[in-house]
Each structure stands twice: as C-alpha cells, then as structure tokens.
Amino acid sequence: MERYPLLIGNEEVFTSETMVVRSPFDGAEVGEVCIAGKDEIEKAIASAHLVFPRFARTDTKFRVEILNKAEELLGERAEEFARMISAEAGKPIREARGEVSRARETLRLSAIAASEHMGGKVLTLDSASNGRDKWGFCQRFPAGPVLAITPFNFPLNLAVHKIGPAIAVGNPFILKPAEQTPITAIMLGQLLVEAGMPKGTVSVLNGLGPSVGQPIAEDDRIKVVTFTGSPEVGLLLSRVCGMKLTAFELGSNSAVYVHHDADIMRAADRIVAGGFVMAGQVCISTQRVYAHREVYAQLIDLILIGIRVLKLGDPSDEMTNVGPMIDEQAALRAENWLNSAIERGAKILIGGNRNGTLFEPTLVADVPDYCELLREEIFAPIIVIEEVPDEGEAIARINDSKYGLHAGIFTQDINLARTAFEKIEAGGVIINDVPTFRADLMPYGGVKLSGIGREGPEFAIEHMTYWKNFVVHGGEKE
C-alpha cells in the first residue's frame, strides 16, 4: 500500500501518525496518508506567511504560466486522477473523468482571471466635491495566505476552484482536504509544485477538521478562509475567522418546478440526472421537485422510467451510474430520514433499499412538510416529488427553506421565467434545466444558510484581494 506525505512549503513531509484511506464501495485500501500535528501546522502557516510578500510581487505572466502548465500536466495525468477520485470518493468513473475535465477548465479560467481581473480602475476624483485637482486609480492587491477547506464530493475541482484564484492573485495557500479524499489533494499539490509554484507557497495538510482546519483558521497569519462543507462547520468557522476574508458554500436542498407547459420528457431526464449524480451527494443535487397538477402523474411515470435504467454499484465499472455513498454512517442517516417520512405518511414510488453504502435511487411522494427529506439537505440519492396547483405555490414552497443555492424552472413561458428569477431566493435560477447545472465560470454561491461569497475564478478573486487607492494632487488647474 502506497504511503502519501504531507506537503509543507512545497516539501514532502512524512509523519509517524497516519490514516488508511478506504474505498466507500468495498472498504478496499486505497492508500495510507500522513496526518498533520501541531508542528506541521505551524510550519505550514509560517511558510505561507514568510513567502507571501515575495509571491505577491511576482509578475502576472509568471503566475499565468504556472496555471497553464498545471492544466497541461493535469491533462497528461487525467486518467490517473480520475481513477483516484473514483477510488477515494466512490464517484462513478465516467463522472470522475468529467470532474478532471472541469478542473482543467477551472485552471484555464484562473489564468484568464489573473490576466483580466487583477487590473485597476481609473477614479474620476474631480467629480467629487472635494476632488478638484486630484486624480488617481485603485488596484487589487493579494490579501495574504489562504486556507482552503474542501469536501469529498468534488475533491479535485472544488480544490482548484479555491487554489486557482489564490495562485492567480499571488496568495500562497494551505489546502485542508476532506479526510475521506486526501490523496487526490496530495496529488494536486505535487502537480502544482512540478508546474513551478515557488518554494514555500504550497502546503497540503491532512487530518480531522477540529485538529487541523480549525487551528489554521484561527491563526492571525491566515488572511483568507474559503470553505465548502456543512452549515454546522461553516457557522463554527465564521465565529473563529474574525476579520479574515471568507467565502463559505454550505449546501442546500435545491428544488425544481415543472410547469404545465414544460417539455416533460426533458424535465424528467434532467431531474433523474440531477438527483442521482454522485449518489445525490452534491450541494446542488435535485432534491425537491414541485410539479404542476396537470403534469404531475405524467412526470412521475417518466422519472420512474429513467430511474429503472440506472445501474447501482461498483464506481470503477464503466456502466455504473450511481455509486456508493461516502460511508455507511451517511447512508444510515439517509435511511433513517426516509423511514421517518414513511412513518408520517410518505410513499416510496421506487427504491428505498440500502445495502451498506449502496443506496437505491429513490423517488418519494406525499412527504409531510416538516420532515427532514424536505427541510434538510439529504445528500443522498433521494428525490421528493410534490404536486402544486400553480407557479405561485411552487415559488412559495421553493423559498420555504433555510437554504438558497440554486433552483430550476421548466417552462416555455418567458414571463414565468422572469418572475421566478426575480422572486426565488437563491444564488441561481436555472431555466429549463435542474439546479445541479453549474458552469465553472459562473459566480457560484448562495443566500441564507447556503453561505456567503462566490466561487468561479473571476469572482473568487474578490475575496482573495483588497482594493488600494492611489491618489495624486496634481496642482490647481489654470
């Protein structure tokens, strides 16, 4: 079994404390990773703090070349990364290849952002009452060392979404990956070192959040914290981060409304795809479906057809559509929530069975409004479908949530699309597709308990930098 090091300031470091990473599908050993202790944490923070002034002053061209080289190397090793993502996270291999492709695009977008969005703006100071005879401009400057905390479901692309913009602006970083998927993160760190990241700028520390992530977040030398994960951890981090720049993406229970004029076959196909990708373990997974009463029965029939052809099983199998959940504890939680809803009158239309970490793609109807399946983020291959009388009721139900990340609307009515866009409380409203759609160039993030800040390289730069003004008194005009 291969043993993987930590990365501290670009250097590989082996520690006596280790952890075995196992496949969520069959428990097979994937690899052994070193765990960071207090000494390793201090060295990583000190390295990032020490190198920041030098890295911040590097030319944009230099950083763009690193990002482009990293994209090139990732392309050469795409299958290696995809296989590791599939093994660690249980992601079906075809989905894993898609994640690698997206990560390459995110690196390219980060390079573009470095070139196009780190410039300044001319300030027309003489338009202000006290600005006579003054001129100036403002410019973005890198904020300082970044702590990037990433989840298990997209261990490569979500890491690149945080690291790419950090490199683009000139911030060194410490990557703290999910404990279930640390090897992909180590491989990414090693690739970035090979791509030319200056000594001291790259650290990857493995371990549990309270013992590794939290003490780094609390340290005053860390200036930016970017996190994707649960609301509970996000709220904890928000309390310990103080005045740091932050971006938190904390999940959702995303909803879809299918209007009576929609393309029902397309809606059904996309709902199946959006609800069961990565076994439903996606922040914008399609969880709640509200169907107009005129198409409710037809939509159910079409969704059932789509579910019946899905293959559940080994993520390394090219034919698998739905792999395992990340661990049995997560699968048991979903099973308990489902059983709780059934006890209160909900009906399973298909699926509902669990075998270890394998959870059948499940469609449920008649779920009482107060059940976890509607109120919480399920993070499992379970879709809830409900009938509504009209679009007004659908929008009200979509908004009746503590979350607000993405929502989807299927309709041919442009006025309804515009109304939904204006009224739905979410970071994105996707017309004629599911909320699971995300292009990596979008300003991605939510409202309410779904988090603060936005990802997407161009927009992530905003929480990785600060504005500085340059003002000159030019003498009185004649």
Image (tube, rainbow, N blue to C red):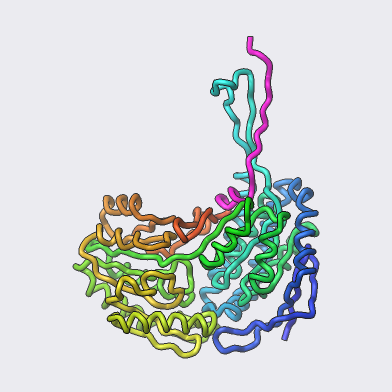
Q: Check the picture and name the quadrant holding the N terminus.
A: bottom right
Q: Is residue 449 left or right of residue 46?
A: left
| Residue 471 lies within the magenta run | yes
Q: Nearer the viewer, residue 26 or 48?
A: 48
Residue 187 visible in the shown view: no
Residue 276, percent across and down? Answer: 43, 75
**What is the span of residues highlighted in magenta in the rendered image?**
458-478
Outermost residue to the front: 239
Q: Residue at x 50, y 53 (%)?
A: 443
Q: Check the picture and name the quadrant holding the C terminus.
A: top right
Residue 430, percent across and down? Answer: 38, 58
Q: Nearer the viewer, residue 456 or 475?
A: 475
Residue 83, percent across and down? Answer: 61, 78
Q: Residue at x 60, y 66 (%)?
A: 150
User: In the figure, 316 relative to 432: above or below?
Assistant: below
The image quadrant of residue 149 is: bottom right
Q: Nearer the viewer, residue 115 or 328?
A: 328
User: In the figure, 196 relative to 55: above or below?
Assistant: below
Residue 370, percent across and down? Answer: 33, 71
Q: Residue at x 23, y 71 (%)?
A: 296
Q: Is residue 109 left or right of residue 369?
A: right
Residue 390 visible in the shown view: yes
Q: Residue at x 59, y 54 (%)?
A: 246
